[in-house]
Image (cartoon, coloured by chain):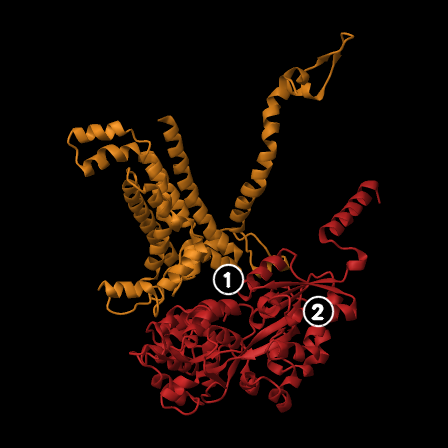
Chain colours: A orange, B red
Amino acid sequence: MGSDEMTVRTLPSGKLKWTWSSVFETGWGARVYPYLMVMPALVVVLGVVVYPVFSGIASAFYDVTLKTLNTGGVIFVGLRNFERVFADPVFLQASTNTLVWVVLNVVAQLVLGLALALLLHRAMPGIGFFRSGILVPWVVPSVVAVLTWRWMYDPSVGIANELLIRLGIIDDYHPWLGDTATSLYAVTVESIWKGTPFVMLLLLAALQLVPRSIIEAASMDGASGWRKLWYVILPQIRVSFAIAAVLTFILTVNNFNAIWLMTEGGPLNSSEILFTLAYKYGFKRFDLGMASAVATMLFVGLVIATTVYLKLIQAREGD
Amino acid sequence: MNVHASFRKSAAAAIAALGFGLSPAMADNIVFWINSPLAAGPDAPIHEEIKAFEAETGHTVEIQPVAHMEMERNLFVALSSGAGPDVMALDIAWVAGLADAGLLADITEKAAPLAGEFQAGPFASGRFNQKQYALPLYTNNVALFVNDRMLAEAGIDKAPTNWQEFQEAAVAMTDKEKGTYGLTFGGGRMGAFQIYSFIWQNDGEIIDENGEVRVGDPEAAGAVDFLGKLYTESKAMPEAVLTAGSWDEVNAPFVQERAGMLVSGDWALGALEKGNPNLDFSVHPLPAGKKAATVIGGYDLAINAATSVPDASWELVRWLTGPRGIELMRKYDRLSAAAAATTPEAIAALPEELQPFMAQADAGTPRPVVASWSQIHNEIIASAWDAVLRGKSAQDAMTEAATAIKGLVGQ
């Protein structure tokens, strides 16, 4: 359709013919037109993103349980669900575990991801094979990865124990997932193994954009490997590094599969994080009010992280 | 009635008809959720039985298999949103919670005359607050599985019949050098399910018939202490007890002939045969303590409180739990909950490996029928058992469990 068809047509008789499309050509119609175009997308976003989020947050302030849902007893209870969550000793343990879980994951994945990216950012025969191979943990479905690690950690026949004994690190088989002192760390190892390739991919892409001339200039000035990394390479990839950090943070907080499939937060809540706790409140106790209270707290934390993420994107665009 | 109102009603009816795919001739289509092992594959006996039901009644039945581990959550989500099946198979432990939430149809009047048809324990499992919400589809209990070769090699000539023999056999079959253990057991909620029988055998209670919480009593704690020490002191359980959170994981050491005994139900028979066809084992009634007792399990059939086809749903429930149910469950190697299935003749007609289960049916004890049972079992008693396995005093762990349960049930 040509643009002239969107306007008021002039008939052979010389009279003007009004068309629907002409409404949006001038005046208020022209101002409304863009909003009409985005309306369908807006409705979809409101329906599938905004409404569920606010509905979930609202549930945190109501007494929503299996019983009240079906007997019409859903009433506004203010902050009572939050009070009940704070009174649950498991919440404190889950919060501490979440902190440990996030810090260990983010730090380890960034350090290992950067190391792998630097290792694979060089020209050598078969580099494509290694770059692809290192992505395998990231590509493997979560369930498959977790079940594999569960068997590796098996206290009687697991390869992890056998390997550590042969290396002389431990003397006897150890129930890594069954010991309250090691369960969270055992799951963290699996999570780091699975998440590191993603960080590596982000940082490798960033490294490939660093002008070679800058690194060569630093070498000519006599900079050592560490100094080149610290003063030349890292500043060049700082935005990608920050983005990787924020994304790893968000993905780790949301990493329900690893913990649920390996330990269900046990034993004795030793690997419980806030996400698994919210799930237990919701689908084991069927107390959706308490589940929503925990989810709301997680949501606020993630909104802050996402805001940081968006700011970083803007900063990169500004560079 | 104005035109708009009339139009709205017509439109609503049309949408409802389109949405649910209903027409007057299809009004008796019954959606039936069943635990997936009973509908595994097109040759599963339930399909033949449903065909017979359809031919007899003219109703149609849509069978939807749901995994046991997913069933409770899926029922909660579906029924709470006003959807879900018309008829559902329920683990007997879930009846109280769903009934308390008003999600199950009250069938007290229809079921009352049928009480004599069923074994008392399984029938009671469908009752909550003096109302009947479900009828038993099949029952089970836990017995003792013994690896006959390992027992003989340990110098013991018969399966244990009491706690002392049980402990001696467990210790005798444990050999750290060979990597063998006397008993495989579950951690967390799996272990909790296994210890109930021993609590009752020791004259203990979880929640008594008056609603009083009794898990902190010395009898209950004594049973937990007895079992816990088989791991913490005798080392007669493998380390896997700390993490075994499914029957597959509990069974594994027994299947691999690394553990000589297993406390489980008839559902283990198929898994053991599949896991190790050459396994030389026998099944025996649980060793008795001060008295014999075994925890009753099994599945009930219940009707959605919001079903649009209550009469047809009741017909289906009666069909599957009636006289034909005995034969249907025999095809699955499951135990019928019918009273007629406990006669000596009926027991003798069962496959040999099922006979010990039915022989101890009289000692079957139901778990407390309280609305918050899932939380009591999955969180409180499971945690207490986990703590005992990690060295906590059984009396302390069970006293704390009692306090937590009292808080939950408002005592």
User: Which mark is in front, 1 or 2?
Assistant: 2
Which amino acid is tagged 1? Lys
> In this image, A74 relative to A167: left or right?
right
User: How many numbered marks does the figure carry?
Assistant: 2
Q: Quadrant of residue B60?
A: bottom right
The kind of secondary structure element at disc 1 is loop
Picture coordinates of residue A192, whole percent (x, y):
34, 51
Pick the front one: B359 or B367:
B359
The residue that label 2 is drawn on is: B50
The residue that label 1 is drawn on is: A284
The kind of secondary structure element at disc 2 is helix
Q: Residue at x 56, y 58 (%)?
A: A65
Q: Residue at x 36, y 47 (%)?
A: A133
Q: Is residue A242 visible?
A: no
Picture coordinates of residue B299, whole percent (x, y):
60, 73
Q: Residue furthest left?
A: A222
Q: Is residue A3 above or below residue B356?
A: above
Picture coordinates of residue B162, whole percent (x, y):
43, 89
